[in-house]
Amino acid sequence: MKKKVSIHDIAKQLNVSAATVSFVLNGKATEKRISEELKKRILKHVEQLGYRPNRLAKSLRTGKSKIIGMLVEGIADPFFSGIARIVEERAYKHDYKIFYASTENDAKITKDIISAFRDTQVDGYIIVPAPGIEEDIQALMDDNLPVILFDRYFPGLATTNVVVDNFDGVYQAMRHFLKNGYRNIGFVSIPSAQTQMRDRLNAYHDAINEHSLTPFIKMISFELKLEQEKITGEIRSFLEANPQLDAILFATNYLAISGLEAIKQLDLSIPDDIAVIGFDDNTHFSLFSPSITAVAQPTREISEQIIQQLLMYLAETDKKPERKTIVLPTRLMIRDSSQPRTLNMSKSG
């Protein structure tokens, strides 16, 4: 097996000191008064050898690994993968690499991953927090490690958070249903006390109470997230038990996908039999027939705020930025699945 080349090997081959090679590779050639000619010679030789410095060894020398740990609920989820892709793109421009991990919103998995990232000596953390990891987040901040939470946060912790206005997103969706003549509106969500789901549920209740309507709520266990058939079956049973429903709002993307399948299985027409709105726009919702109305989260703006805030913490300055919660607006993408009820009735009549 070919022996791995070290800095000492390169120094010996070029008849210079290992320290000189290290200074050049760490961008300190000018600071250490290394000539431009020698710098170019070293860099050319390194490139020809295909030498790659050990990041862990480099982090021990510089105190920086140039790695950011990113923990999301599920990297396969279109929302989280979209955020991760843009964050990675922006981070790379600042010479940072992103290490991803999925937590499945599980506290134990999250704690284990944080521990692994600590061992890797990552420079900062971007986290979609699972319930029950408050102490772990606080411990990171106590060690002066930059932490950015997004999508949700812990109200009792003084963290920097990037979130959307979940309450307003659902409230505007409900107003749209009501404006279009719908009165028996169902809400399908998960039983969660986390900030984003709590705000969505509260918005539904407020809209229902303001118009003295009857709430129709179906809670589906998060444990079923990977079992689409079971989720579809539960939503189908909910619709069969409440035939008076003329509209339904899904609190997450994956619930909307299963809900659309349940509606199809029941041979219901959208929006003639039941109108639909999903929270979090799917890349294919505009291509559905009929196209699906959805509350869209500003993926690019969220991503840019995340990396911007983290880079401010990572900057080598005496004054660190103030911890705060950044709330971004959602946008209701109105499509065919929620058109006015009067129009639906005239079409079917």
Image: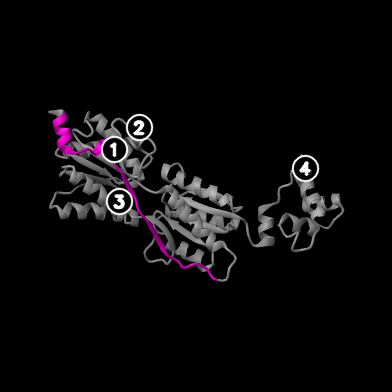
Give, as a three-letter code, the residue at label 1.
Arg
Disc on the earlier residue, 4 or 2: 4
The residue at which mark 2 appears reads as: 287
Kindly identify the amino acid type of the residue bearing the numbered disc 4.
Gln
Query: In what quadrant of the picture does the N terminus appear?
Result: top right
Instruction: Give the spatial CA distance, label 4 vs label 2.
Output: 49 Å
- SS for dot 2: helix
Secondary structure under the numbered disc 1 in the rendered image: loop
Quadrant in the picture for the C terminus: top left
Q: Residues within 10 Å of mark 1 (few under 14, many from 20)?
A: some
Cα–Cα span, label 1 and label 4: 56 Å
Gap between marks 1 and 2, in whole Å? 10 Å
Q: Label 4 near label 3: C-beta < 8 Å? A: no
Determine which residue is flagged by label 1: 335
User: What's the residue type where badge 3 is placed?
Assistant: Gly
Residue 169: assigned label: 3
Label annotation for residue 125:
none
* Mark 1 vs 2, N-terminal side: 2
Please name the colour scheme applied to the rendered image. one colour
- Which span is picked out in magenta? 319-347
Q: Earlier in the sequence, mark 3 or mark 4?
A: 4
- Above or below: residue 276 compared with residue 157: above
Residue, disc 4: 48
